Image (cartoon, rainbow, N blue to C red):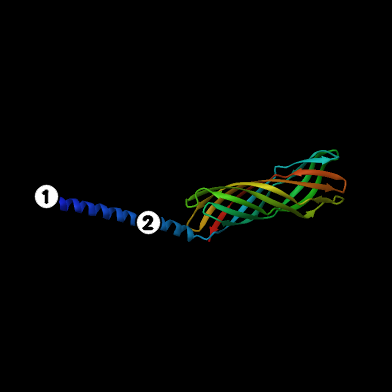
Amino acid sequence: MTKSAILGTRALKAAGLATVLAAGTVFGALSMAAPAAAEDKSPWMLRVRGLAVVPDESASIDPIGGDVSIDNSLVPELDITYFATQNIAFELILGTTPHKVSAKGTAAGDVDLGKVWLLPPTLTAQYHFLPEGNIRPYVGAGINYTIFYNKDEPTGINIKYDNAFGFALQAGVDVALDDNWALNLDVKKLFLNTDATINNSIKADVDIDPWLIGVGVGYRF
């Protein structure tokens, strides 16, 4: 092999080594940059939504028969989300909602049962599929505990509602506006049952099972 060929071979080897080293340096920089970008994000997120609460109600009323009717409600809602990892988060949902309640088709006809407020704090565990994307879908499941309070009963009627635990399913999506703000659409289904006692004599086993449909904004600190 001539001297020029040997020099050419060495030059090619040196160039190849330089390319490998450069590629390794770039790859290393990128692999270090991705975790750093994730670590820069706060694990806390707040969302504010307008929430439609749509009961999917039914009841067994003893001994007068009939069914229950619970009206829809539109209320504000606040939720607090903590990201344990990029994909796994826990969300606490806070809001309270008023409803008109009536018994329909009973032996005594239709009966106005007044109004009652529900406070259903709900905790869900979520999985976020694309936490770094512009469109970030997620699903969740959890539990809730519903408190009935501030009853407004018609004259001559006294109702006792039992506070109760329930289960929740959830699906939603965040649409990024910038590094911190996002639009949010969220749908939850609560599986909620309560026992109601009317005038200490009439018993009602009530499935409320509301849909919670929320639209709002979120802020990731």
The residue sitting at 63% across, 55% down in the picture is 92
Q: Which residue is mark 2?
A: 28
Q: Give the image location of residue 213, x and y in percent.
A: 62, 47
Q: In the figure, residue 31 lies in which quadrant?
A: bottom left
Q: Secondary structure at mark 1?
A: loop
What residue type is disc 1 on?
A: Thr
In this view, the residue farthest toward the left is: 2
Q: Nearer the viewer, residue 216 or 5?
A: 5
Q: Position of residue 218 (x, y in %)?
A: 55, 56
Lateral position of residue 8 relative to residue 193, left or right: left
Of the residues tagged 1 and 2, which is closer to the observer?
1
Identify the element where label 2 is drawn.
helix
Dot 1 crowding, Cα within 10 Å, few <14, some 14–19, many 20+: few
The number of numbered badges drawn on the structure is 2
Q: Residue at x 78, y 45 (%)?
A: 102
In the rendering, which numbered label is found on residue 85?
none
Name which of mark 1 and mark 2 comes first in the sequence: 1
Alpha-carbon neighbours of circle 2 within 10 Å: few (<14), some, or many (≥20)? few
Residue 207: x %, y % from top left: 74, 43
- Residue depicted at x 79% and y 46%: 195
Q: Left or right: 104 with respect to 141?
A: right
Quadrant for residue 82, please give it: bottom right
Q: Amino acid at mark 2?
A: Gly
Q: Identify which residue is drawn at 82% across, 50% down.
A: 159
Kindly identify which residue carries mark 1. Answer: 2
Spot occupied by residue 149 in the image (x, y as percentages of width and height): 76, 55
Relative to 13, 150 lies left or right:
right
Label 1 close to label 2 by CB (< 8 Å): no
Rounded to the nearest whole Å, what is the CA distance between mark 1 and mark 2?
39 Å
